[in-house]
Amino acid sequence: MPVYRAMPLLLLVSIGMGAAASAEELSIEKPADIRADEPMLGKFDLSLARQSLDRSAWHWQKTFKCVSCHTTAAYMMSRPSIHGDTAAFQDIRAQLEEMVEEKWEKKLPAPVYVVATAASLAINDQRSTGKLDPTTKKALDRMWEVQRSDGGFDWLNCGWAPMELDDHYGVTFAAIAVGTAPDGYAKNENATKGLEGMKKYLADHPAPTTHHRAMLLWASHSVDGILTNEKQKEILAELMALQRPDGGWSLSGMLIDWPEFSRKDDLKPLVDVSDAYGTGMVICIAVKAGVPVTDERIQKGVSWLKSHQRESGRWFTPSPTKDSKHFITNTGTAWAVMALDACGETAKSQ
């Protein structure tokens, strides 16, 4: 049952049974431009983080009507880390479900949008209700219609690291979605066959960057058989070794083995800057891989995150590519919140 059927009547009317509501109706202020020089808050404020995530994701979806990995998908993954639904979250969820239930029935979009939407809903289900929503199941089922014979999916390959770099990212993201989907979805016949195809693709196509190996490690803790235990340990050690003296990790540092870095001098200075994407992602994956929250390295990373939130509630992350607007900051903010939640910090702030 689509989530908007369970919404309060006022909100149900305001979104027109799944149609996007206006900013005035939901009173959602547009987020300020992302700036590298925005002042630090100096402490962790969960309420401001929620406000930042809600504003950024809602206005992105309203403006572009696109399930972007760097904003919408990251938001759907991270929102359960902050207890309490908001009108913004309910409306975004309703929009995604409307796409699956209505628009996809008329015409299935490009594979990248099918995978991103299905993954957004599946991970959100797992981290919120723990139950597989029927619309989420329908979205996951549609993934098998767009999976290639080699097990991969046609992805956006426009050189915008780390998410729109190659097909490899799309395969790991899809595997994570299927592996984390509640109610044993991965065990049904279509999912089992689809996962076998993805495993073959990943075995035939080595991860091109440390970032992609981190995605593999995450996927391997969601789906059995993607990596051996030894390879899991090897990637985890590789990630932990990238921790910088200030306690953080750098997204650009996880992309240093991407060939583009050898051809673009303007990217190299970013390697030595800790950011929320790298820090949050490594902490989340390390904890999932069994590193104790009390580990000194994890605690140093937590301290970095708590001291680097900006006054708007977001965590600035510099784009490693030509995106001058640094939209990857929205993903960095999502990873920061998920990492702090994984380490028990959000519970202290509820």
Image (tube, grey):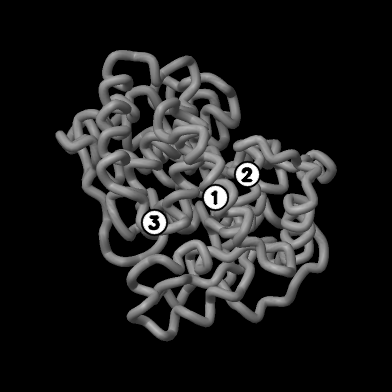
The answer to whether residue 18 shows anywhere in this view is: no
- Residue at label 1? 25
Q: Which amino acid does label 2 sit on?
A: Ala
The residues bearing labels 3 and 2 have C-alpha atoms spaced at a distance of 20 Å
The residues bearing labels 1 and 3 have C-alpha atoms spaced at a distance of 33 Å
Query: What quarter of the picture does the C terminus occupy?
Result: top right
Disc 2 residue crowd, few under 14, some 14–19, many 20+, Cα 10 Å: many
Where residue 217 appears, x then y in whole percent?
A: 49, 41
Residue at the front extreme?
A: 230
Vertical placement of 350 versus 158: above or below? above
Q: Which amino acid does label 1 sit on?
A: Glu
Residue at x 27%, y 64% (from the top left corner): 158
Residue at x 53%, y 77% (from the top left corner): 270
Q: Nearer the viewer, residue 207 or 315?
A: 207
Q: Which amino acid does label 3 sit on?
A: Met
Mark drawn on residue 286: 2
Where residue 329 appears, x then y in whole percent?
A: 55, 64
Marks 3/2 in contact by CB < 8 Å: the verdict is no
Marks 1/2 in contact by CB < 8 Å: the verdict is no
Marks 1/3 in contact by CB < 8 Å: the verdict is no
Q: Nearer the viewer, mark 3 or mark 2?
A: 2
At mark 2, the secondary structure is helix
Vertical placement of 328 versus 152: above or below? below
At mark 1, the secondary structure is helix
